[in-house]
Image (tube, coloured by chain):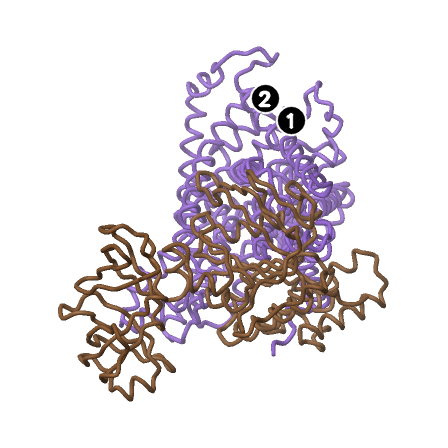
Chain colours: A purple, B brown
Amino acid sequence: MHWHDRLAQGLLFACCAALALFLIGPLLMIFVKSVQDKDGVYVGLVHFREYFATPELQQSIRNTLFVATVVTMVTVPLAFTFAYALTRSCMPGKGTFRVIALTPILAPSLMAAISFIQWFGTQGLLKGLLAGASVYGAIGIILSSIYATFPHALMIVLTSLLLADGRLYEAAEALRTPMLRRFFTITLPGAKYGLVSATMVVFSYTVSDFGIPKVIGGNYNVLAVDIFKQVIGQQNFNKGAVVSLVLLAPVLLAFIVDWFMRRRLQAQFSSRAVPYVPRRSPGFDRAMLVFCSAVSVFMLAVLGMAVYTSFIKLWPYDLSFSLRHYVYGLIDAGVIVDYFNSLKMAFYTALFGTLFIFAMAYLLEKTRGMATLKAAVRLVVTIPMAVPGLVLGLGYIFFFNHPDNPLNGIYGTMAILVLSTVVHYYTSSHMTAVTALKALDDEFESVSASLKVPFYRTFFRVTLPVSLPAVLDIGRYLFVNGMVTISAVVFLYAPDTRPASVAILNMDEAGEIGAAAGMATLIVASSTAVCVLYAIVTRYLLRRTQAWRAAPRP
Amino acid sequence: MTLRAPRDPGAPVSLSKNGDRSPVARDDAPYLELAGIRKTFGRFEALKGVSLDAARGELMVFLGPSGCGKTTLLRIVAGLESQDEGRIVQGGRDVSTVPAIGRDYGIVFQSYALFPNLTVADNVAYGLVNRRTSRETIRSRIAELLKLVGLPDAGPKYPGQLSGGQQQRIALARAIATSPGLLLLDEPLSALDALERVRLRGEIRALQQRLGVTTIMVTHDQEEALSMADRVVVMNAGRIEQVGTPREVYEKPATPFVADFVGKINVLPAVAEGSGRFRVGSVSLALDHRQDIAAGTEVKLYLRPEEIGVHVNGHAAAGALAAKVAKVEFLGAFCMVGIALDAAGTPSLVANVPRQQVDAGRLEPGTAVRVSLPAGAMRVLS
């Protein structure tokens, strides 16, 4: 074997070892801990029996499933209609609507909960709309989760609608197919995978999210908060492991359904599809405009309330402008350090995460040999999608806090926060990288070998520059998620590495809503800045390194 | 640096009088030897023990339907795929287990595989830069190569700005830039439109002969194979059916598969009557050169459409058979004429008849004709 091949294989092995260490190991520890007692003695399924015998915990399961089901049933149709308006209507302002609908991604999910408390809480402006019902509980969780999951569902459905082949519509029109029948025979089947995928993502997100129910859930218990209570409140790690596994079950199920759908639908779209171009239809366009405006008002109301809260003295008594929450609540109280921790963490996550994920995807897709190992790795990298952040975080505690683990030095450092965040958001980033790499000619590596050019040179000279848009995209995705993540890191931070999202949680508990809203606003502002920077850099880089894309054809 | 001269200047390409290209005069040792190559993918046997020699400087074409193993064989020669069994010797060196990067060849793919973010000049120079050649030398080499493939001004452009045929010329220039001992072409013309394909195949052939580089090309297009190859290797289902010059495989197909795959051919089921006579339906034909087949043996007779003589008036050659035109299909210079040999209308033959002759004889369905089936051109395969 040539040393180039050896080098590639060595790198692949190293990457696999890293995945085993930072993903498989922690997850396995959860299984181990769930059948052990405090002292590490094997006790079988005792914890599970205890757990299922406790009525309150059973109630948590029902609550969790109820909330997730309602959120899914509302969000997915909303997102589909919104995406349909963006792709199939000629309404004005599509770009703006799209940007507004995606803003929730920039904010930690907690922010939505805080915002809804301001709107509908005890002193809320619109409290009357709830007709006596309290926003603390199922209603608040559902509303906040719809807000938080909407952009995720929208992006998935939008992609599947954009992939539609315009020629199918032309053929249907030539056959005089009525509009409604076209919708049910072309649009809906084409978007089927997207819809299923969006359903699974929204469901999993709602089940796994811990920030929203913690802030607005009141006494309405859900699984994610149960884990937090068991681990942080009662220091009962083994029970926490059990709840983790219970939480993992529905998410894993959603993931498996999604996986099978994906396999079945893979070959549906031909690469020669002609994009669909909508035509004017005044009535329909106006209806879509009204719908999208309503959704956008909802989105802006949530974001706007949080920002507004951070800039006034005291809701709802003193609405005068003030920077006191920032000056006293964040800077003087020393909480601003947490914001810088988050910036640092998001930056490292983006930097090292992108490097690792892209390199791994390259080794998987573009090097030869070791087919069995690669198949296994392809499966393993889809796991993070199915693992709620809390579960991953708990696994990290078990694995890295173990005295026999030589790596337990990273416990309580920035490194473990970065590592857990990279792993948590691995799957989507990996998919982006693989899609970009698959778009490249498979023979680049063969040609390089025939010209006796080592593979790494071709990687740096061709593969990386050509894939730069995808690489930057991964970096931005990891940064934004690094800024807002809370679930995995809530178990892993140390006092000097506490991230901003955890600070929001603490300030909310302490009743400092204004400061909490201020921190959320800072996060949104930073993420927005990075997205704008991304747009500028991408444009600049595209002009410089991707001149070939824009080069005029003969 | 100059372009490589043919490695064996004493063996120029010889053209025989009738324009037939006979293979390049061989060295004693073939340049490339494949022995007992086997390859399976899962349960699928892609190559079932293939052995083959290529002479120095010859252009050898692997021809066959898709899935016959021709591309797999090429990739094994390139080291991009590893054989399960078998030996590969290139230029006297056993490269059976040498990875791609350690072998000596240039390769051109159907998809061009040009690096989209590098200019044409950088693409061509891709393999040169690595060899610590001086910048000046590289620049003149690029200019030389671009001129050679007929695109002297393409250097600063990006591949995306060129047409498919131009891109493939650049890919060719890149492949020969390092003067490899072996040039591999994997369906290089399949992605191009018909006109460009014909033009480029002539250019590739001329370039190959000029450089004298041993070349293997894979194609499923028999016209391409016949027009370019010194020798054609007809493959089917992981095996070699026949190796021969284009004329050999066309005129003397060794197997029914070759007869059928290369060119159009009439197949007449027949029964041997002994002493070189064969009965086709109600007609008895004399094939003096096949006296060896025992009476009663069922065989198939193969005859190219252009070998069949179709005569309208009485002055047909001796031994011509009475027949009727069943169908006339206009193909430009030629017409494809369907012929029924007896009153019952079976079996049918297809003959290629020049357009003028069709007009002169007023050939149309129902016209009574006499057809001559030249025994010398007829092949018996069972």
Specify whether A89 is left or right of B380: right
Question: Which amino acid type corresponds to the residue marked 2 in the rendered image?
Answer: Phe
Q: Quadrant of residue B312?
A: bottom left
Q: Mark 1 lies on which chain?
A: A
Q: Is residue B196 left or right of residue A550?
A: left
The tag on residue A306 is none
* Disc number lying in front (1 or 2): 1
- The structure residue drawn at horizontal position 52% and vertical position 28%, both measured from the top left corner, is A244
Q: Is residue A251 above or below residue B244?
A: above
Quarter in which the C terminus of chain A is drawn: bottom right
Subunit ID for the residue under disc 2 = A
Q: Which residue is drawn at 27% across and 63% down?
A: B286
Q: How crowded is mark 1: few (under 14 residues within 10 Å), some or many (20 or more)?
A: many
Question: Residue at (43%, 57%) from the top-left corner?
Answer: B65
The percent coordinates of residue B114 (x first, y second) are: 64, 63
**Can you identify the residue that label 2 sits on?**
A237
Q: Residues within 10 Å of mark 2 (few under 14, many from 20)?
A: many
Q: Which part of the image, by quadrant, shows the N terminus of chain A?
A: top right
Q: Separation of disc 1 and disc 2 at Cα?
A: 9 Å
Residue designated by label 1: A397
Q: Which residue is drawn at 80% across and 56% down?
A: B131
The reply, left or right, for residue A114 in relation to residue A267 is right
Nearest the viewer among B257 and A279 is: B257
Mark 1 belongs to which amino acid?
Ile
Figure quadrant of residue B253: bottom left
Q: Is A229 located above or below residue B36 in the figure?
A: above
Local secondary structure at mark 2:
helix
Query: Residue A98 location in percent, x, y?
Result: 53, 62
- Residue A455 spot, x, y in % from top left: 70, 49
Closest to the observer: B81 or A516?
A: B81
Q: Do the residues labelled 1 and 2 touch (CB within 8 Å)?
A: yes
Residue A318 in view, yes or no: no
